[in-house]
Amino acid sequence: MTVPTQTSPQPGPATANDVVLTVDRLNVMYQVDNPVHAVKDVSLTLRRGEILGLAGESGCGKTTLAYAINRLHKPPAEVTSGSITFHDRGGRDIDLLALENEELRAFRWSKLSMVFQGAMNALNPVISIRAQLEDVLTTHEPKMSKQQRRERCAEVLRLVGVDPARMNSFPHEFSGGMRQRVMIAMALLLDPQVIIMDEPTTALDVVVQRGILQEILRLRDELGYAVIFITHDLPLLLELSDRIAVMLKGEVVEYATAEQIYRLPAHPYTRRLLDSFPSLTGDRGAFLRTGESSARDHATEPDPTKGKRP
Ligand SMILES: Nc1ncnc2c1ncn2[C@@H]1O[C@H](COP(=O)(O)OP(=O)(O)OP(=O)(O)O)[C@@H](O)[C@H]1O
């Protein structure tokens, strides 16, 4: 593992074409007896091909924000103000908060997809992997022939490192890591411009996790999607992300490149968060700062920073 050294996109003005998603002064409330202001005036821009990390401790509003962006929030959650705009490849701006049912269904998966925490358990146990992947294509691309559907499913499975020959298997015949790869394949099926990943690898062991993260980076380089990556694991975000937004009690308190967050954290909460990971600030973390790691680390953990863009 190494500290991020890539030239990340700088926060600040980006040209219109650079940006794929703009969240502007978004507020989300849970309208319960004692209303919870879960997302407070959050503004973010996601650039094409960028990995934006969302960090913060449990309960700070990360998932609420992700759900609102994908319009998956349900009462008692309510977006009380602000806007979310998707800047489509073709130049069209889509006001996500204004999308109606049918438009929303067409939008999800095809332009923006999501891989949830524990998504691997969302696969239907009695339906084959092939049928579950094909179902997404049947719904969104009804004109595709059976043959084309099958080829596309094989293609995305190959992309995430799952042998397409196993397409007819059922989820229980796959390991947790393989199932999570299938979920990522599903998220890639319609070639989305943005993928939101909410703790996508938390349930997996470190080696499997790193393998999957490497694939996500490699595919980002190949396919050009942008990612909003949510986790409370700040060391992981430092390696993976171009920029990081740190959330505290619903607010984004710091928003900068991974390198800036690591080397010069501006907000006291970010500093506390960094300090809470001894591997980043204590003796054990020397390899993070120097880029040196032991032979054992090299042998067991693929380096996810390798896939980062120059
Ligand atoms: N259905 C609900 N009703 C009321 N409050 C809720 C509801 N769901 C979440 N909250 C509150 O909203 C705030 C943000 O929760 P959220 O799940 O978005 O945080 P998070 O950062 O994603 O946490 P975690 O990392 O544990 O998933 C918390 O205070 C939480 O208690």
Image (tube, helix red, strand yellow):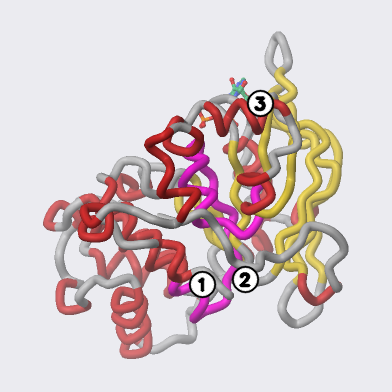
Residues in magenta?
218-244
The type of residue carrying mark 2 is Gly
Image coordinates for residue 52, horizontal then vertical, percent:
62, 55
Spatial separation of the CA atoms under disc 1 and disc 2: 7 Å
The type of residue carrying mark 3 is Pro
* 71 in the magenta segment: no
Q: Which residue is mark 2?
A: 49
Label 3 vs 2, first from the N-terminus: 2
Q: Nearer the viewer, residue 293 or 306?
A: 293
Image coordinates for residue 187, horizontal then vertical, percent:
45, 64
Query: Which of the labelled discs sits on residue 180, or is there none?
Result: none
The verdict on label 1 being within 8 Å of ligand 1 is no
Looking at the image, which residue sits at the far left? 173
Q: Nearer the viewer, residue 207 or 134?
A: 207
Secondary structure beneath dot 2 equals loop
Query: Which of the labelled discs sits on residue 220, or is there none?
Result: 1
Q: Is residue 106 visible?
A: no
The type of residue carrying mark 1 is Arg
Q: Nearer the viewer, residue 296 or 22?
A: 296
Secondary structure beneath dot 3 equals loop
Please state which of the two labelled residues, at mark 3 or mark 2, is closer to the viewer: 2
* 220 in the magenta segment: yes
Quarter of the displayed picture in which ligand 1 can be seen: top right
In the displayed structure, 21 sits above or below 166; it is above
